[in-house]
Amino acid sequence: DPRERLVWVFDEATADEFLIGRHTSQPGIFFSSAFEQEISDAADDPVVGTFLRHVAERRVDYLEECYRALGCSTEEAHHRGLLAYAAYVGTMRLGREVPGRVPQGDGYRAYRRHLISTLVPPKESRPIMG
């Protein structure tokens, strides 16, 4: 089910353990936030930049595939995939650059629920058409 896949991806990508630098329950799916931030800082390196572009493109492609499976047009799936990935990258960057702005504890868990409910259409919704 594409909704379940999206919920799983967002849940894993924004897990408390992930943002504090530990690995998630599925090693190899996501890197620790510390690793992602360090490698992102080296994006100007030709090898690192190529790797980062490849990883980001695969992640966005996967999100787009899920949104298309929910009935989004190609264009809307692309926009939703970019928005979802931007939310993920932005949350990571905020945690590093302005950590006081990212909620902690129960507030962060509420933020995660909001993020998922915003980015994943509910099951009872009609097919998405763009």
Image (spheres, helix red, strand yellow):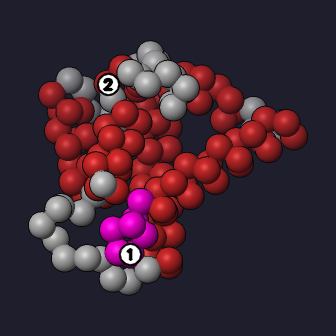
Q: Is residue 10 visible?
A: no
**Circle 1 residues within 10 Å: few <14, some 14–19, many ≥20:** many
- 99 or 56: which is nearer to us? 56
Q: Residue at x 50, y 38 (%)?
A: 93
Q: Residue at x 38, y 83 (%)?
A: 130
Q: Is residue 36 visible?
A: yes
- Residue extending furthest bottom? 130
User: Secondary structure beneath disc 2?
Assistant: helix
Q: Is residue 18 located in the magenta-colored stretch of the structure? A: no
Q: Position of residue 71 (x, y in %)?
A: 35, 75
Distance (Cα) linking label 2 and label 1: 30 Å
Q: Which residues are magenta?
A: 66-72
The residue pinned by badge 1 equals 72
- 30 or 36: which is nearer to us? 30
In this view, 33 is above or below 79: above
Q: Quadrant of residue 99?
A: top left
Nearer mark to the viewer, of 2 and 1? 1
Q: Amino acid at mark 2?
A: Asp
The residue pinned by badge 2 equals 16
Q: Amino acid at mark 1?
A: Cys
- Residue extending furthest right? 46
Q: Residue at x 78, y 35 (%)?
A: 48
In this view, 6 is above or below 123: above
Give the mark nearer the N terminus: 2 vs 1: 2
